[in-house]
Image (tube, rainbow, N blue to C red):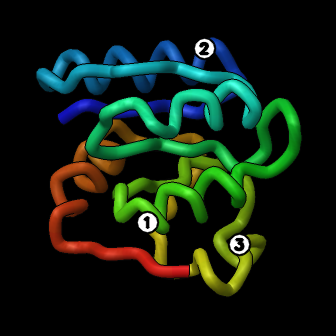
Amino acid sequence: MRILILEDDPFIASDLQSILEDEGHEVVGVFDSIAETYQHLEDEFDYALLDIDVVGGKSFGVANALAERSIPFAFVSASKPGDLPQSLREVAFIPKPFEERAILQSIDSSSSRSYSC
């Protein structure tokens, strides 16, 4: 799969990228800000991993844009699932510190999920 990452901690972003590439996925972009991510939402990718609190605020607008385009995604965050807006509470949520298998399972199961806002 082609995967976009929104993560403002360079160590975590690097970890995620390594995990994904080791499994044969292509990381199409690693972005640390909401503004930068918006510039790449029209790029071709199949899945996204989003931190919630990043440079520029919370990633909920990016999440809604992905949902509108029917691109599956998961939040990877130290926030609590209850902090999500009601419209995003059905989205996969992986708490930090994350386990590699949780990241990979979210991608594997993405084809069976759909999101709406």
- Mark 3 or mark 1, which has the lower sequence index? 3
Locate the N terminus and report the quarter of the image it occupies: top left
Q: Which residue is mark 2?
A: 11
The image quarter containing residue 71 is bottom left
User: What is the CA distance from the residue labelled 2 to the residue labelled 3?
Assistant: 24 Å
Helix, strand or loop for disc 3: loop
Locate the C terminus and report the quarter of the image it occupies: bottom right
- Mark 1 or mark 2, which has the lower sequence index? 2
Q: Position of residue 50 (x, y in %)?
A: 56, 44
Q: Residue sitting at 49 percent across and 13 percent down?
A: 14
Query: Mark 2 belongs to which amino acid?
Result: Phe
Crowding near pointer 1: few (<14 within 10 Å), some, many (20+)?
Answer: many
Disc on res. 31: none
Name above or below for residue 9 compared with residue 75.
above
Of tags 2 and 3, the one toward the viewer is: 3
The image quarter containing residue 10 is top right
